Amino acid sequence: MKKAFFALIFLVAGAVVMHAQADIKEAKKNLKTAQKAVSLYNLDNRENSAKLEEGIDAIKLALQNDELTATAAPFLAEGDLYLAVASRDVSMPMLDPEWKTVDYNAAQLAFDAYTAALPLSEKKFETEAALKGLSETAGYINNAAVDAYNQKDFENAYKGFATMLKIHDLLVENGKESFLADDAKVNDQYLFTGICALQAGALDVADEYLSKLLKRGYNEPGIYESLFNLYQAKGDKEKAKQFLEEGLGKYPEDTGLLFAQINLYLQEERTDELVGKLEMAIEKEPTNKSLYSTLGQVHDKLYQAYDQKGDEAEANMHFDAALKNYEKSLEIDPEYSDAVYSIGTLYYNKAALMSQELNELASDYSKEGIKKYDALKAKIDVIFDQALPYFQKAEAMDPMERNALIALKEIYARKNQLDMSNEFKERLDKIDAGGTISSSYFKKN
């Protein structure tokens, strides 16, 4: 009985071995299919393009075998396949305009495969093949990252730039020449990665790369501006200011840092200090329309503040300065909608402030009181009329500009043009109900 029992055990064990042998045999067969697919594609790209898909299907099956995946061979084959696909994505559209790219994210998959192969490489030729593959893959990853950046896809941009740094490190560690030939290029790569991660909202990733860059001794204005923006985004305003002040101390003439300081002052409403900073920025960029517009907004705030204090001379000075800067931005770009709307608002707010005094006169029914009321009302009407064409133009530029519609509704109501006032009230009601205004009332055909 015992002999029969042991015979059964040996029989089952033998079956398992045979099954494992069958698996590895099939896996190696699939590996050869994958390797052959790349060779055939390299012989004739156009004729054998479909072989790459056959190879990808085969290598996926081969990678299911644990014995085979303990070696570098299947990962090298996988890397070669996806590297060939990355090459095909570039060359085939030029050869065949009807070509449809298969979206594998091929360059990244090639990188993953070669990096998996590297620590498993027991023979020199395997190590060399993995490193060569990584070096060739870098160009495709860089192109994809640059394309993503140009399309404002900052997440894929920073991931691509970060992969480039990983490839650089692997090449250098293994004594190979890197595409990032010197420290300056490596530093630029860290900066690109950090900035793109910041733009993508990946704040911890941005912090990682920008901090590494600082530790590398990188000492250029861009790092301080980026760290200021990073810690602003993290809500650590004190640390943000620390980097901004350090950067300005080293590079007081840098435009990027100056603009960062202007943005900080805008947030903190440090209007008196902003005037000088904006004037300094305008000296550096005299054709920057947004700087004139921003300076106009600062003078506008100062005008309102001094008007509330009752300092008429100072208020008028800031009103004139605001108007002058808005008009300057329109000289640079006559279709600059921000400036158009801002001039309308400047006049409108002035008339609204004067209307407060008018309300006080409304209760004085004496002959002198009525005379003052009528004179002031006439002045206010003139100022509202000055605002009107700017709001008309703002509405023509954007029929969904809600504040322009409110101003138009109110101005026409004051002018007793109720049909016009109701027109803009209906448009406002439609927007407030979640609707869309597709055509402008004032747009010229």
Image: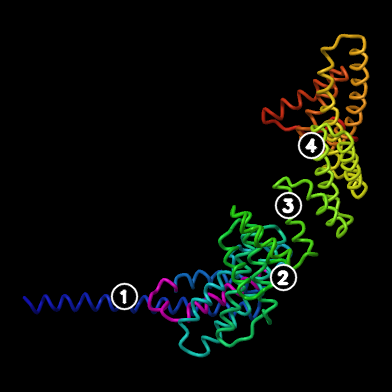
**Picture quadrant of residue 361:** top right
Mark 2 lies on residue: 220
- How far apart in space, not on screen, are marks 2 and 4 (Cα)? 39 Å
- Determine the residue positioned at 56% across, 61% down: 204
Closer to us: 42 or 287: 287
User: What label sits on residue 19 in the rendered view?
Assistant: 1
Lower position in the chain sequence, tag 3 or tag 4: 3
- Tag 4's secondary structure? helix
Q: Nearer the viewer, mark 1 or mark 4?
A: 4
Position of the C terminus by quadrant = top right
Mark 4 lies on residue: 305
Q: Residue lying farthest left?
A: 1
Q: Amino acid at mark 2?
A: Glu
Q: Position of residue 104 (x, y in %)?
A: 58, 65
Lateral position of residue 16 relative to residue 160, left or right:
left
Lateral position of residue 30 relative to residue 252, left or right:
left
In magenta, the rendered stretch is 63-89
Lower position in the chain sequence, tag 2 or tag 3: 2
Q: Position of residue 285 (x, y in %)?
A: 86, 58
Closer to us: 314 or 48: 314
Q: Amino acid at mark 3?
A: Asn
Mark 3 lies on residue: 263
- Determine the residue positioned at 57% across, 77% down: 80
Q: Amino acid at mark 4?
A: Ala
Above or below residue 143? Residue 313 is above
Lower position in the chain sequence, tag 1 or tag 3: 1
Determine the main secondary structure of the stretch shown in magenta. helix
Lower position in the chain sequence, tag 1 or tag 4: 1
Position of the N terminus by quadrant = bottom left
Q: Nearer the viewer, mark 1 or mark 3?
A: 3
**Picture quadrant of residue 122:** bottom left
